Amino acid sequence: MRAACGQFGEVQEVMMVGGEHNPSCSGRGFGLVTFATAPAANACAEARWLEIEGRPIAVQSAQLKSGR
């Protein structure tokens, strides 16, 4: 994840949630990536899809849920 996202700019943090990285969590899992700059994050989000370990991965910007 870090290498795939790093092509857009400096990655500060990667957090994997669920899936094979956490067997106690059901579902496919997801990852959260923190970039050093907003332009790097925007460039990654604009890509829409990345290939990681031969698998297509959807890329989306995190969105705040209303009421939080």
Image (spheres, rainbow, N blue to C red):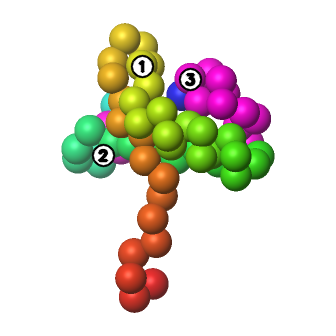
Q: Amino acid at mark 1?
A: Glu
- Disc 3 to disc 2, how far (Cα)? 26 Å
Q: Is residue 14 left or right of residue 26?
A: right
Disc 1 crowd rating (10 Å Cα; few below 14, some 14-19, many 20+) is few
Q: Quadrant of the C terminus?
A: bottom left
* Residue placed under numbered mark 1 in the picture: 51
Where is residue 39 shown, x and y percent of the image?
Answer: 70, 46
**Residue corresponding to mark 3:** 4
Q: Quadrant of residue 43?
A: top right
Numbered mark located on residue 24 in the image: 2
| Residue in the image at 41% along x and 36% along y | 48
Question: Which secondary structure lies at badge 2?
Answer: loop
Q: Amino acid at mark 3?
A: Ala
Q: For the residues marked 2 and 1, what is the alpha-carbon distance in whole angstroms?
A: 25 Å
Verify whether residue 21 appears in magenta. no
Front-most of 13 and 4?
A: 4
Q: Which stretch did the figure color magenta? A: 2-19
